[in-house]
Amino acid sequence: MSWDSGLAARVEDRARAQQLRDVRAKNVFGGRGFLLGRSAFVIVYDDALIVKCPPPEYAEALTVPGVTPFAPDGEQPMSTWVVVSGDVIAEDPALDEWVARGVRALREGPTKPARRSARRDT
């Protein structure tokens, strides 16, 4: 599957507008992921956005029309990830909210441990 390059550019613009530093884009799960450090906070997938939610906000996010649990390949939904349809994020203020939610999820949640170097000093 591919991603919408226009939506990816909008996410980059919104991240800059929120003064997020060190955001990088990377191909992730067939989409275009936006990461802080080693962790993704949003992924542009087709014309939708996959967003990591802070756990206390997950149930509320699912009440928004056009937002569904992220369940890759129809498997078990991933705990705090949601799919936000393109209609929901058509306007920049709405996109800002979802980008900010993803960033909050990373900042409020546990972080991935640093990678260990494969090389060992002896």
Image (cartoon, helix red, strand yellow):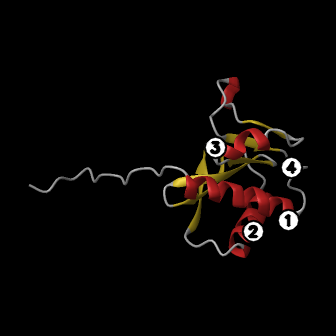
Q: CA distance from mark 3 to mark 2?
A: 23 Å
Give the labeled residue for mark 2.
Answer: 14
Give the labeled residue for mark 4.
Answer: 86
Which disc number belongs to residue 92? 1
Q: CA distance from mark 3 to mark 1?
A: 24 Å
Residue at the spot x=66%, y=54% of the render?
Answer: 102
Q: CA distance from mark 2 to mark 4?
A: 15 Å
Amino acid identity at mark 4: Gly
Res 19 quadrant in image? bottom right
Residue at the spot x=58%, y=64% of the render?
Answer: 24
> Mark 1 or 2 closer to N-term?
2
Front one among 112 and 108: 108
Within 10 Å of disc 2 (Cα), the crowding (few <14, some 14-19, many 20+) is: some
Amino acid identity at mark 3: Pro
- Of all residues, the one furthest to the front in this rendering is 56
Q: Is residue 6 visible?
A: no
- Left or right side of 111 for 12: right
Q: CA distance from mark 1 to mark 2?
A: 8 Å
For the residues labelled 3 and 1, say whether their Cβ atoms are less than 8 Å apart.
Answer: no
Residue 47, position in %: x, y?
82, 48
Residue 56, position in %: x, y?
67, 44
Within 10 Å of disc 4 (Cα), the crowding (few <14, some 14-19, many 20+) is: some
